[in-house]
Image (cartoon, helix red, strand yellow):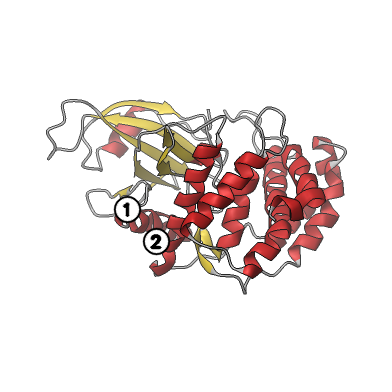
Amino acid sequence: MAVYTHLGAEELAELIAQYDVGTLRSAKGIAEGVSNSNWLIETSGPAQSDLSESARYILTMYERRIELDDLPYFLGLLDHLSSKGCPVPRTIHDRNGAAFRMVDGKAVALIEFLAGVSPTKPDPKQAFAVGQTLARMHQASADFPTSRVNTMGFAQNYVVLQQCGVEGLASINPDLPAMMDPAAQAAALDLSALPQTQIHADLFPDNVLMLGNEVTGLIDFYFACTGAMALDLAVTHAAWAFAPETNAFDADLGNAILRGYEDVRTLTADERGLLPDIAKGAALRFVASRAEDWLDTPDDALVTRKDPMQFVSRWHIYDEYGSDIFA
């Protein structure tokens, strides 16, 4: 399970009592995610409701990469998008109206639970729907009044790999240090002239909930930031357009993501022209973050490390076929 901090039943019950969500019935650690501790919470339901069955929420404790000052942006963006009709969970505010609370020096937030299942083997219809939903999210976030710098941008990815060091990278895989030069090249790519909005920046299949071909939830916005819409599309493409078992590029999935997105919002000529290079940078973003996690994750943390070499392979595919993939 992706749980770094262990909260006892009494601590969880006391925390949940600070919200108008009823009394705690159960709490279960959630396996997904590598940066935060997450629990599926079941309660007796809000006092004002007539629910006879339990209500569900997601409790997140922010462990890594999350700055306290960024939480109003993350949680406010959830509420903004939810109010615009996007399939995004709203923040549950406590009895004093606060969007998050502090527990033992760490921030925690209670988030609405949304029905749906993350696809493990996405098909083109699902990918098309995700592309549509991403474009609608970009449009809905255009008037969000707050901004946030992308702390996982291409330049920062290069810094992360440098901090991992050649020896550290080689301890993961002997071929990994060779990605330092491509990361340095990506760091010079300027996306500031491309259309900007609030972007998710981490839209993997496990951050999407679906019922059939319908997107019921976009979750885990803790890398969200103000940035190029084309970057968000490239990240999503890199996360969805490769077969889970073989890591081979799946043209049907890749094309479906692009067609779904442009069904809602047409890319500019500049965006389309830069997509191959942006996609390589997007792949390197996960090479860097996975390498950092691999080296920094405590041995006793209940979390499975993710292999950065999976995205090294995707970088090579984009490097070789990028122009054809995005033609």
Q: Position of residue 87 (x, y in %)?
A: 37, 47
User: Could you tell me which residue is drawn at 78 percent across and 49 percent down?
Assistant: 321
Contact? badges 2 and 1 (CB < 8 Å): yes
* Alpha carbon separation for disc pair 2 and 1: 9 Å
Query: Would you name the residue on which mark 1 appears?
Result: 85
**Residue 53, placed above or below residue 242:** above
Which mark is drawn over residue 106? none
Residue 314 in the image: x percent, y percent?
74, 43
Q: Is residue 164 visible?
A: no
Q: Position of residue 115 (x, y in %)?
A: 35, 34
x 71%, y 35%: residue: 307
Q: Position of residue 229 (x, y in %)?
A: 55, 62
Q: Amino acid at mark 2?
A: Ala
Indicate the amino acid at tag 1: Gly
Q: Secondary structure at mark 1?
A: loop
Residue closest to the eye, 289 or 243: 243
Q: Does 264 sit left or right of 44 as displayed?
A: right
List the residue tagged with mark 2.
Answer: 140
Which of 215 and 23 lies nearest the eye of the viewer? 215
Rendering quarter of residue 28: top left
